[in-house]
Amino acid sequence: MAQLSVPGTGPVYLDACVFIYSVEGLEPYRTMLEPMWDQAGIGDFDLVTSELTIAEVLVKPIKDKDQSLVGIYNELFESADIKLIPTTRQVWEEAATLRALTNLRTPDAVHATTALQERCTAMITNDRAFRRVEGLNVIVLQEALGTPW
């Protein structure tokens, strides 16, 4: 199994897919992400995400009427393990600028803006489009696996 190399200091931003892979047990990513959760749990770094992530991860469980999974997500977002960053007007305005400069989709621009504002040392995702954002250290899970797209 490929190792995920996460900076040992500073906050780490998690894209919505990281929560889905971990909570819903989607392999090989769940196993790959496990050490990151352990490191954060012992205080090596903080895990950060936008409140937008809540809307993204709950769609399928709500659609499937899976209240158990909705509850698991809600419990995680209410825990001290995750720092949820509000989507303020400033975030939306900066996301619009970032979107205009990079052609990211609106949700991705919100995630990238939030990661930059929080001075995250890395952003974990499975979307290479984030590489268009200057100053954002992007860790793409598929690439960490060493398997082709």
Image: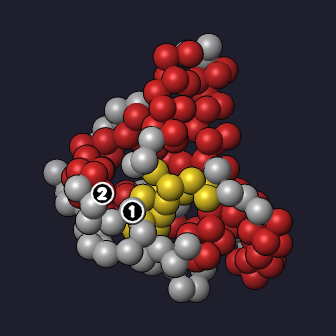
Extreme left residue here? Answer: 1
Q: Residue furthest bottom?
A: 135
- Tell me where residue 77 appears, x and y as whole percent: 51, 41
Which picture quadrant has residue 137?
bottom left
Q: Residues within 10 Å of mark 1 (few under 14, many from 20)?
A: many
Which residue is labeled 1 in the image?
A: 46
Task: Give the crowd class for mark 2: few <14, some 14-19, many >=20 residues within 10 Å.
Answer: some
Q: From what the image shows, is residue 17 above or below residue 24?
A: below
Residue at 65 percent across and 31 percent down: it is 59
Image height check: is 101 above or below 138? Answer: below
Which residue is identified by label 2?
40
Left or right: residue 106 compared with residue 21: right
Q: Nearer the viewer, residue 18 or 82?
A: 82
Residue visible at 23% across and 51% down in the picture: 38
Q: Is residue 140 visible?
A: no
Of the pair 75 and 21, the residue shown nearer to us: 75
Residue 103 showing in the rendered view: yes
- Residue found at x 64% / y 22%: 62
User: Are dots 1 and 2 in contact, CB under 8 Å?
Assistant: yes
- The amino acid pointed to by label 2 is Ala
